Image (tube, rainbow, N blue to C red):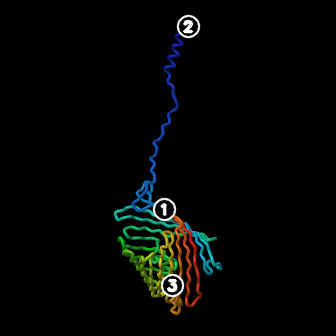
């Protein structure tokens, strides 16, 4: 190799060594967002979880129900009718300086071929004993069987209520919008009612006293119920007096009812029931004092497995001034 070739080779090697090599820009991965898993909230009982990013606890519950009803002209001219119901409840709770703050929403869909209807079944805010919204009144309560007829025809109202609660006692007062309630001829349907409820337990005995005054009809009703554990079951008794037809009670002027819920096995409950109506029905805007009625029935509840049960009932009603009638239903329900 001559001197010239050696110089050229050295220069090329030096240039190669001194020339930088540029690679593609490196990809820098972003820091991963922290994943917040759903946490169980056990402050308010089972089934609650924290809504991610909040201190509010949420519970989703409900049931699916299939029923077959039987009776004269149950639907149109048919003596039977089947329907299905989907019921979903959302309950949100959080702590405040006034105690737990509760918000509840219930959506219900009733499927009755060919009609399917969805309704807002309840929706209310509850804090420190005060409740405001759409919810069921104390007049929705009843005995455990399916024979008694001791509640209002419409028990779901837009209401404002205060209820004091202790361990085995409660007492409250509510102001109810009676928009769908009873109203006599010449009255407007959108009236107001005031109701009170008192109840509690003492050992094997439970009780409830409910009263309501319908301001538009200027009439009211009062109901007393009691239950006591006797032998293999629970005896339940109830009585009602209504001054005249009103939104809180309009079936009869006075009523007595009884049942005995027999716990036959851990899964089987059998409940015979009886009810007597004095001055049953409405004639010319008042109770029919020439008509009494009595009713007997039997209800059977069976727990098939966890969260699924069956119910069947048959009832016989015999009024003085009209034909007797036998009705009943079978129900299959899955709760979640």
In this view, the residue in front, 266 or 28, is 266
Q: Is residue 107 above or below residue 28?
A: below
Q: CA distance from mark 3 to mark 2?
A: 125 Å
Spot occupied by residue 291 in the image (x, y as percentages of width and height): 53, 91
Spot occupied by residue 258 in the image (x, y as percentages of width and height): 47, 82
Q: CA distance from mark 2 to mark 1?
A: 90 Å
Q: Secondary structure at mark 1?
A: strand
- Which is more N-terminal, label 2 or label 3? 2
Spot occupied by residue 194 in the image (x, y as percentages of width and height): 42, 79
Few, some or many C-alpha atoms within 10 Å of disc 3 (few <14, some 14-19, many ≥20)?
many
Q: Are marks 1 and 3 in contact (CB under 8 Å)?
A: no
Considering every residue shown, the one lying at the far left of the view is 97
Considering every residue shown, the one lying at the far top of the view is 2
Q: Is residue 101 above or below residue 137?
A: above
Few, some or many C-alpha atoms within 10 Å of disc 2 (few <14, some 14-19, many ≥20)?
few
Considering every residue shown, the one lying at the far bottom of the view is 290
State which mark lies toward you, 2 or 1: 1
Residue denoted by label 2: 1
Residue 90's disc number: none
Residue denoted by label 1: 60
Please tell me in which quadrant of the rendered image residue 195 appears: bottom left
In this view, the residue in front, 300 or 173, is 300
Q: Residue at x 58, y 75 (%)?
A: 329
In this view, the residue in front, 244 or 37, is 37
In this view, the residue in front, 326 or 162, is 326
Q: Is residue 19 above or below residue 326?
A: above
Is there any visible trace of residue 21 in the rendered image?
A: yes
Q: Secondary structure at mark 3?
A: loop
Residue 251's disc number: 3
Q: Are marks 3 and 2 in contact (CB under 8 Å)?
A: no
Spot occupied by residue 271 in the image (x, y as percentages of width and height): 50, 77
């Amino acid at each position: 190799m001559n001197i010239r070739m050696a110089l050229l080779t050295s220069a090329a090697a030096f240039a190669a060594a001194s020339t930088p090599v540029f690679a593609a820009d490196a990809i820098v991965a972003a820091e991963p967002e922290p994943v917040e898993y759903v946490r169980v909230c056990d402050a308010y009982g089972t089934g609650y979880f924290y809504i991610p990013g909040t201190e509010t606890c949420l519970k989703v519950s409900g049931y699916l129900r299939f029923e077959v009803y039987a009776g004269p002209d149950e639907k149109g001219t048919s003596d039977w009718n089947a329907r299905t119901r989907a019921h979903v409840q959302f309950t949100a709770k959080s702590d405040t300086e006034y105690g737990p703050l509760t918000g509840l929403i219930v959506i219900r869909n009733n499927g009755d071929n060919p009609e399917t209807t969805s309704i807002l079944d309840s929706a209310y805010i509850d804090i420190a004993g005060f409740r405001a919204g759409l919810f069921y009144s104390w007049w929705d309560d009843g005995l455990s069987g399916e024979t008694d007829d001791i509640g209002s025809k419409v028990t779901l109202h837009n209401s404002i209520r205060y209820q004091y609660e202790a361990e085995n006692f409660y007492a409250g007062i509510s102001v109810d919008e009676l928009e769908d309630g009873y109203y006599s001829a010449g009255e407007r349907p959108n009236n107001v009612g005031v109701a009170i409820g008192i109840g509690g337990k003492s050992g094997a005995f439970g009780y409830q006293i409910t009263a309501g005054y319908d301001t538009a009809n200027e009439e009211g009703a009062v109901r007393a119920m009691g239950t006591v554990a006797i032998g293999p079951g629970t005896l339940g008794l109830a009585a009602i007096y209504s001054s005249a037809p009103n939104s809180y009670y309009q079936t009869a002027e006075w009523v007595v009812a009884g049942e005995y819920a027999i716990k036959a096995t851990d899964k089987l409950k059998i409940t015979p029931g009886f009810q007597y109506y004095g001055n049953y029905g409405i004639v010319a805007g008042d109770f029919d004092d020439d008509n009494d009625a009595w009713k007997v029935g039997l209800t059977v509840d069976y727990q098939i497995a966890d969260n699924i049960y069956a119910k069947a009932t048959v009832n016989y009603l015999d009024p003085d001034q009209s034909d007797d009638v036998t009705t009943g239903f079978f129900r299959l329900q899955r709760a979640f």
